[in-house]
Image (cartoon, grey):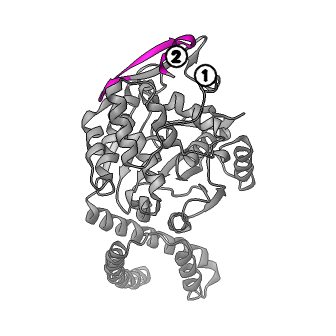
Amino acid sequence: MSKLDAIRTKINEIDRQMATLFEERMEISREIAEYKKEQGLPVYDANREQALIKQNLTYVKNKDIQDAYISFLRHTMDVSKQYQKRIITHQQQTSKVLTITMKDTSYDIVIQNGGLQHIESYFSFTHQNVLIITDSGVPKTYVECLQQQIAHAVVYTFEQGEASKNFENYEKIIAFLIEHSFSRSDCIIALGGGVVGDIAGFVAATYMRGIAFYNIPTTLLSQVDASIGGKTAIDKAGVKNIVGAFYPPIGVLIDSMVLKTLDKRQLYAGLVEALKMGATSDASLFEQIEKSQDVFSDIESIIIRALLVKKSIVEQDPKEEHLRKILNFGHTVGHAIESKGGFQRYLHGECVGMGMLYFCSEEVKQRIQAVLEKYHLPTRCELLKEELLSYMMLDKKRTGDTISVIYVESIGKCKILSLPFEALDPYL
């Protein structure tokens, strides 16, 4: 036997031992995956991984190969994480995926109870710097859960509320990205309601002419409406969404479990957007909300049905040139009520609910009003006709002296009316 053959025999024996140890390690990884699934824990724990690397590095005495060992160990841990993800994903089997397909892009909406705890089972953030944008109303446990699963993730938090959706916060977030050396290969995750999604999406659309953007909506309103379709915006001069862009996300995760921390007012206000989908396009969805005895038990079904309505509409009209305008039912007057109140008095969904009562038949009005009352939502605003008109003049749906409004004649059917401002009197 030559000297080389003798050396190879030794390394072959070491490889045999390593294969046995690897198999043992992966079996333990399987047990860990099953435990994490039971306890709702994330696959990736950044603090644990860094501590393990630091500890194991002390076992390698030869400093010349320490960097190589770190690479070897990281690769081994990556293989283990992927194995755990496959096990957890296979066990879940309950996730639903809706794919939004448009002319220039497509993206998935993953609907999974408890999905926030396993984000990397659905989206990969490998080798990216990640900015998690959230607000003070999002529970810290959600933010920490997400951050622990993603390497190189930093968090930017602003004050909760529509009043924060402004240029000042936009500029602060841009400065934060520059300070942390974010590049076009990095990404942003919105973790929060519609305000968070709007401003995070607008930042993503404009930073370096566009970087990747993921959306994890945490309110019912944002889950059924604001999280998909690619609309991003900020407010200016008291006018809602006056500055914005169409910029679709790379992916959306909807986890209805996070709704358990919403108070009833927020939940019911969010329900209005689903009610709107039903009123304009799906009579059976409207009836489900109308007749539900326990709306939270029905919530996942309501979310999916509302998403299917919006999916169909935005795929046909991604830039709101015609059909997509029907999603604005209730919004023309609703935005006026919201702006007049300085975005403080009413929630967005409450304003949309009141706004729907203006442009519909008497029969539809009675049914909508009954649903709003059932869920303890306001049905009257104090704005005078002249005040409503002054805000509607600034609406994005205005063209010259006319404005597009959505009129519902019967539940599930609607039409787009282009009306001169002087013809609005009978409706207001």
Q: Is residue 415 magenta?
A: yes
Q: Position of residue 105 (x, y in %)?
A: 44, 34
Specify the segment rendered in magenta: 408-427
Few, some or many residues within 10 Å of mark 2 (<14, 14–19, 20+): some
Of the 4 image quadrants, the one containing the N terminus is: bottom left
User: What residue would you read off at disc 1?
Assistant: 389
Q: Is residue 65 magenta?
A: no
Q: Position of residue 151 (x, y in %)?
A: 56, 64
Mark 1–mark 2 distance (CA, rounded to whole Å): 9 Å
Judge left or right: residue 50 versus residue 181: left
Vertical arrangement, residue 223 with respect to residue 237, above or below: below
User: What residue would you read off at disc 2?
Assistant: 424
Q: Nearer the viewer, residue 224 or 262?
A: 262
* Residue 233: quarter of image: top right
Mark 1–mark 2 contact, CB under 8 Å? yes
Vertical arrangement, residue 367 with respect to residue 12, above or below: above
Q: Amino acid at mark 2?
A: Leu
Q: Amino acid at mark 1?
A: Leu
Q: Nearer the viewer, residue 56 or 178?
A: 178
Secondary structure category for the residue under label 1: helix
